[in-house]
Amino acid sequence: MDDPDALYEFIAGTALLPYIEKLEDEVKADFVAEFKERIRKRFVKTPILYPFKRIIISAKF
């Protein structure tokens, strides 16, 4: 990712989506602001490398 905001957009569109959808507007705004701040503090170098695991399952019946 090029910057912390791009990383947030990626995470918000995947892992955070089920949580963000359930929050009220005011709480959602506070949550997003805090989450972005934590990303900025944690990922200070660019480009940002954000590894994440995926589980791929295949089955035949």
Image: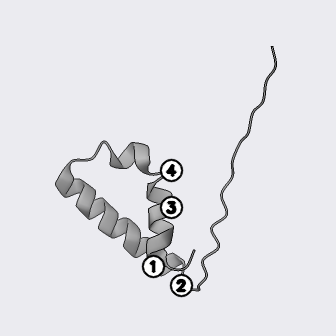
CB atoms of marks 2 and 1 within 8 Å: yes
The amino acid type found where label 2 is placed reads Val
Question: Residue tagged by mark 1?
Answer: 40
Rendering coords of residue 11 (x, y %): 49, 59
Between 32 and 56, the residue placed more toward the observer is 56
Rendering coords of residue 21 (x, y %): 33, 44
**Cα–Cα span, label 1 and label 4:** 18 Å
Question: Residue tagged by mark 3?
Answer: 10
Q: Nearer the viewer, mark 1 or mark 3?
A: 3
The amino acid type found where label 3 is placed reads Phe
Q: Give me the disc on residue 15.
A: 4
Query: Mark 1 or 4 closer to N-term?
Result: 4
The amino acid type found where label 1 is placed reads Arg
Question: Residue tagged by mark 2?
Answer: 44
**Cα–Cα span, label 1 and label 3:** 14 Å
CB atoms of marks 1 and 4 within 8 Å: no
Element class at badge 3? helix
As drawn, 17 above or below 10: above
Element class at badge 4? loop
Quadrant of the rendered image containing residue 5 = bottom left
As drawn, 51 above or below 23: below
